[in-house]
Structures are given as C-alpha cells and as structure tokens.
Image: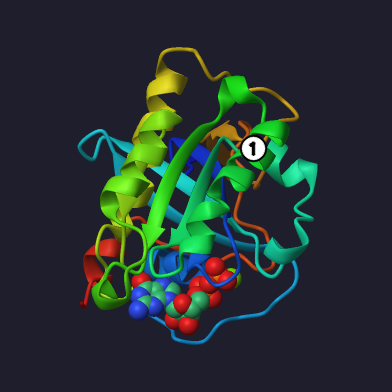
C-alpha cells in the first residue's frame, strides 16, 4: 500500500533580524495562531512547521521555519542554517529605528552564506499595531526593499495583519523559481524537497523530510481556517 505525503513540496526558510524584533512571535502567530507577550531567550535554533496551500489551493507546501532564537546578538548563525534555506525573512521592528538600520548587515550576512542563485528574500516590518511609536515609515521600508529588489510587507502579529500573507507570498515566489527550473532540487541540500509517497511498511520511497525534529510544531493543512480568532 502506498500513502501520499500530505504536501507537494517542502521549503525551508530562516528568520533573521535583531533581537526582539518579533521573529518568534510572528512564527507563533502563523503556526499556532497565538500572540504572546513573553520573549523566549532560548539559545539555539527553534523549528516551526506549517503546511499551506498556494496557487489558489492547488499546491500544498510544507514550510519548515528556522527561528534564530537567542543567536541574533552573537551573529553566530552557522553557515549550514543559511546554506540549507531557500528563503530568508529579514525582520525589523518599525518602532525601533536601529533594527531597521541593521537590516543591511543582516542582508549581507545572509547573502554571504546563502547561495545567491537559489534564495528568495523578504523584508518584514513588524508591530504595525504600535502606530503611535513608529520610527520607520512604510515608504522607508519599501524604498530599502526596492533598492535591493526584495519584496516588502508590513505585519502585526498582535492583530494578525499580513501574517499568513507574509509566508504565502514568499512560498509563491520560491515556487515560481522551482517551476521555472531556476531552483533545482538536489541531494544534500534541504532548501527545497519534493513531497513523496510512503509505503505501508513505512519506507519513504521519495524524499520528503518528515516532521521529526524534537522542537518542531506542525499544524495540519487546514488549521488556518480554525485558528484566526482575531
Ligand atoms: N504590539 C506588538 N508586539 C509584538 C509584536 N510582535 C512581537 N511583539 C512583542 O515584541 C517582543 C519581542 O518579540 P519576540 O518574538 O520574542 O522577538 P524575537 O527576539 O525577534 O524573537 C515580545 O514582547 C512580543 O510580544 C506585534 O506584532 N505587536
Ligand atoms: Mg525569538
């Protein structure tokens, strides 16, 4: 007997940006539909995962998301985390200008380590619900992104503004490049993997990476419809 893996492709993404810009909170809002006001000082990389659909619901993408918890200030994100990502979300906090000023360092750091011919970047401006404390205008954020030819999106994990759109839009961009052959699936590279079929005796006859990370948190494919209580 052969079972279908519940996704067509897996894309691995990394979230980077200064400490406390809102990386973990955005990931929790996306994968668990929670807004949390505590900041987790965990040192290490935390994994999240969620299956979404793109191409008007026709294609199921498992996003494996690497949160660089606690490492931001040390800039010690290892080369393999970058190398095995097909996309990087670069986050800043619109209420703290220095986090925006540091974005260029994050971009260059990522570009140094991610093979440039197979990565999609996205600038994410966080905390749009805190309009009174805004220090960086949308125009400035967009101008920076345009200069480097990167997509730009403003979000609020608190009121769930553009949370799903952030991840859907980078997944659509990555799939465009997979479809056109610009990004090729390769053994030994975890950025893009194809979903596959699993036999009854549990042997994976294709190469989808199952969700076997201790820290991972996976939501079922349609969970987003149950989880938007904002
Ligand atoms: N008001 C508001 N606060 C946020 C938002 N996102 C994150 N925060 C807060 O910002 C702080 C740092 O967030 P965290 O996700 O831990 O940042 P990280 O270090 O980049 O992972 C926490 O107290 C969060 O509650 C948001 O969209 N709106
Ligand atoms: Mg964090």
- Give the side of residue 182 with respect to residue 61, left or right: right
Q: Is mark 1 on a helix, strand or loop?
A: helix
- Give the side of residue 150 with respect to residue 160, left or right: right
Q: Quadrant of residue 37?
A: bottom left
Which one is in front, 208 or 197? Answer: 208
Image position of 25 with respect to 200: above or below: below
Residue drawn at x 61%, y 47% as measured from the top left:
106
Which one is in front, 7 or 224? Answer: 224
Q: Where is residue 151 in the image (x, y as percent from the top left)?
A: 36, 37
Q: Where is residue 173 in the image (x, y as percent from the top left)?
A: 38, 31
Which one is in front, 111 or 170? Answer: 111
Q: Which residue lies furthest to the bottom in this view?
A: 38
Mark 1: few/some/many CA within 10 Å (<14, 14-19, 20+): few
Q: Where is residue 146 in the image (x, y as percent from the top left)?
A: 36, 32
Residue at mark 1: 108
Residue drawn at x 21%, y 78% as measured from the top left:
229
Image quarter where ligand 2 lies: bottom right
Q: Total marks drawn?
A: 1
Disc 1 beta carbon < 8 A from ligand 1? no
């Amino acid at each position: 007997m052969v079972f279908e893996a519940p996704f067509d492709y897996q894309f691995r993404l990394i979230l980077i940006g200064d400490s406390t810009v809102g990386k973990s909170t955005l990931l929790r809002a996306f994968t668990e539909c929670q807004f949390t006001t505590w900041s987790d000082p965990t040192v290490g990389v935390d994994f999240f995962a969620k299956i979404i659909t793109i191409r008007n619901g026709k294609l199921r993408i498992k996003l494996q998301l690497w949160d660089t918890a606690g490492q931001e200030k040390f800039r010690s994100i290892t080369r393999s985390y970058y190398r095995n990502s097909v996309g990087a979300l670069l986050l800043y906090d619109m209420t703290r200008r220095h986090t925006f000023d540091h974005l260029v360092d994050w971009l260059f750091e990522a570009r140094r380590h991610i093979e440039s011919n197979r990565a999609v970047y996205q600038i994410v401006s966080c905390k749009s619900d805190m309009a009174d404390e805004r220090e960086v205008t949308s125009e400035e954020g967009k101008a920076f992104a345009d200069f480097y030819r990167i997509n730009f999106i403003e979000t609020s994990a608190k009121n769930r503004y553009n949370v799903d759109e952030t991840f859907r839009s980078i997944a659509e961009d990555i799939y465009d490049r997979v479809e056109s052959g610009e990004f090729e699936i390769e053994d030994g590279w975890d950025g893009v993997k194809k979903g596959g079929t699993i036999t009854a005796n549990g042997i994976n006859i294709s190469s989808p990476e199952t969700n076997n990370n201790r820290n991972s948190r996976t939501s079922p494919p349609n969970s987003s419809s149950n989880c938007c209580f904002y």
